[in-house]
Amino acid sequence: MVVVVVEVVVEVVMMMVVVMVMVVVVVVVVAVVVEVVAAAVLVLVVVVMVTTEAVMLTKLQSTYHHQQINTQLFTDRMPFLSPN
């Protein structure tokens, strides 16, 4: 009788250890997935920021270029307004 009880207790303890190991594995996998997703989101944010900055810079350069052309056309027609 005592031997049967000990065997049952040993089996229960072994099952608990297996379950605990499985829980640890699941927690580690979830942590890795969260880290990968966080890294992907960070990369996406950086790409969006760089793209937005490039678009804004292009628009700014385009606006400046058009202002230069407009100023040149304006001063060519009215030379007395030219700074030279």
Image (spheres, helix red, strand yellow):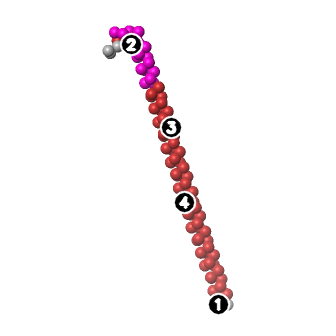
Q: Secondary structure at mark 3?
A: helix
- Amino acid at circle 2: Thr
- Give coordinates of residue 31: x percent, y percent: 54, 60
Q: Which comes before the other along the chain, label 3 or label 2?
A: 3
How far, Cα to Cα, is label 1 from label 2?
108 Å
* Mark identifier at residue 75: 2
Q: Report if residue 70 lies within the magenta region.
A: yes
Depth check, mark 1 against mark 2: the one in front is 2
Magenta-colored span: 63-80
**Relative to 30, is 73 above or below?**
above
Task: Assess whether mark 2 and mark 4 are in contact (beta carbons under 8 angstroms).
Answer: no
From the viewer's side, name the closer residue of 39 and 23: 39
How far, Cα to Cα, is label 3 from label 2?
36 Å
Residue matched to label 3: 51
**Mostly what secondary structure, the magenta segment?**
helix
Depth check, mark 4 against mark 1: the one in front is 4
Q: Secondary structure at mark 1?
A: helix
From the viewer's side, name the closer residue of 14 and 71: 71
Q: Secondary structure at mark 2?
A: helix
- Amino acid at circle 1: Val
How far, Cα to Cα, is label 4 from label 3?
30 Å
How far, Cα to Cα, is label 4 from label 1?
43 Å
Q: Report if residue 35 lies within the magenta region.
A: no
Q: Which comes before the other along the chain, label 1 or label 3?
A: 1
Depth check, mark 4 against mark 3: the one in front is 3
Residue matched to label 4: 31
The residue under the point 47% across, 36% down is: 53
